[in-house]
């Protein structure tokens, strides 16, 4: 029996546990959040679907963070799809984007393996608010985002985990099962739960509320639901972070760009926020007249040529 809890499945993360075996679970359903991510670019359908699944995966994994901070999952390819990246925080916010060969014709039924090509990588990065970042990287293995994640976790000796993901034009959803740490579970019991989870269809995952979905799958088990947590879209870009990036590029390069173009313009890949730095901005940033210096150097080069 499940606890009687009134739940709204849209843009929420719901935790649950099995009282009759040491397994915990997470369910995520994104609607407005996913639409906000997807509307930033005209993604081909096949890439749109994969990015939705990765966005949900990031939210699922970040919900298990034991610290305040961010979790970033990247899928890097050498085919028409160059990169999928999704970032989620311990505060249940997320953002995501993709880069691909926009000149290529991409069939809507193209598989993830074909999109990525050979030699792809899966990268997971943890960024605590306090302390040093950590990154793990492995070659891609599997023909779906869910399989790639499960293979990564198996290789990195994480807890036994089963993940199901789905996404369409308006919704993205996910279900995660995980053995509880330092508790024994009969291998047959874990296999049974995974086998039941594998019967879940994309249509069910995207359209059913969490109570109905879990009852359909696990009605023979004691499943206890916890209060849901809202998930929101949030981008961490800022003018300050763009300033830091320009400082890393250096006064000469940035000064030359402004001297030639009149300003430096940067668009956030995640939310499309537009940042403009003109001559006064750049000179103030570097604490000297880097634009005038660049103009003199450019003029000298022209004379020498």
Image (cartoon, rainbow, N blue to C red):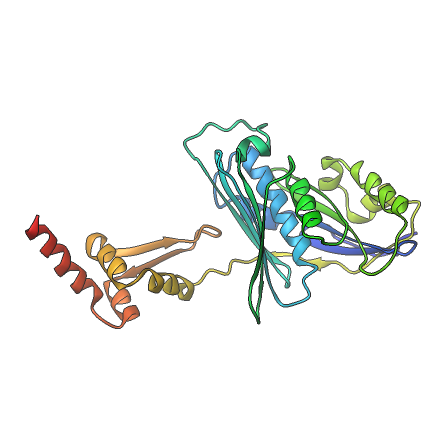
- The vertical placement of 6 against 38, above or below, is below
Residue at point 60% right, 38% down? Answer: 49
The picture quadrant where one finds residue 38 is top right
Residue at point 51% right, 39% down? Answer: 77
Q: Where's residue 93, x and y in %? A: 60, 58
The picture quadrant where one finds residue 144 is top right
Which of these two is toward me, 149 or 196?
149
Residue at point 20% right, 68% down? Answer: 289
Q: Is residue 220 left or right of residue 226?
A: right
Regarding residue 131, the answer to whether it shows in the image is yes
Q: How many numbered circles are shown?
A: 0
Q: Is residue 262 left or right of residue 176?
A: left
Which of these two is toward me, 148 or 210?
148
- The vertical placement of 18 against 166, above or below, is below
- The vertical placement of 244 against 196, above or below, is below
Which of these two is toward me, 148 or 172?
148
Which of these two is toward me, 299 or 183?
183
Q: Where's residue 281, x and y in %? A: 28, 66
The picture quadrant where one finds residue 182 is bottom right
Regarding residue 173, the answer to whether it shows in the image is no
Q: Where's residue 39, x and y in %? A: 51, 44
Residue at point 72% right, 36% down? Answer: 202
- The vertical placement of 43 against 272, above or below, is above
Q: Where's residue 89, x and y in %? A: 61, 60
């Amino acid at each position: 029996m499940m606890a009687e809890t009134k739940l709204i499945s849209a843009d929420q993360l719901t935790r649950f546990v099995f009282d009759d075996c040491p397994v915990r679970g997470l369910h995520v359903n994104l609607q407005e959040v996913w639409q906000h991510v997807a509307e930033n670019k005209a993604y081909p359908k096949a890439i749109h679907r994969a990015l939705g699944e990765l966005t949900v995966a990031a939210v699922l994994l970040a919900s298990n963070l034991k610290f305040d901070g961010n979790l970033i999952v990247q899928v890097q390819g050498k085919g028409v799809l160059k990169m999928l990246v999704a970032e989620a925080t311990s505060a249940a916010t997320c953002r995501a984007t993709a880069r691909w060969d926009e000149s290529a014709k991409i069939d809507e039924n193209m598989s993830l393996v074909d999109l990525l090509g050979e030699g792809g990588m899966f990268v997971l990065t943890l960024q605590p608010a306090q302390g040093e970042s950590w990154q793990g990287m492995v070659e891609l293995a599997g023909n779906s985002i869910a399989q790639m994640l499960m293979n990564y976790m198996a290789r990195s000796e994480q807890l036994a985990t089963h993940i199901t993901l789905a996404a369409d034009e308006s919704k993205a959803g996910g279900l995660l099962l995980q053995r509880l740490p330092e508790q024994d579970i009969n291998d047959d019991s874990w296999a049974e739960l995974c086998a039941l989870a594998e019967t879940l269809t994309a249509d069910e995952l995207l359209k059913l509320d969490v109570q109905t979905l879990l009852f359909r799958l696990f009605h023979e088990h004691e499943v206890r639901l916890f209060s849901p947590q809202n998930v929101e879209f949030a981008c961490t870009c800022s003018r300050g972070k763009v300033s830091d990036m320009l400082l890393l590029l250096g006064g000469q390069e940035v000064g030359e760009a402004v001297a030639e173009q009149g300003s430096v313009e940067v668009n956030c890949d995640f939310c499309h926020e537009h940042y403009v730095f003109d001559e006064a901005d750049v000179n103030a940033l570097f604490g000297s007249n880097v634009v005038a210096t660049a103009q003199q150097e450019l003029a000298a080069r022209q004379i020498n040529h």
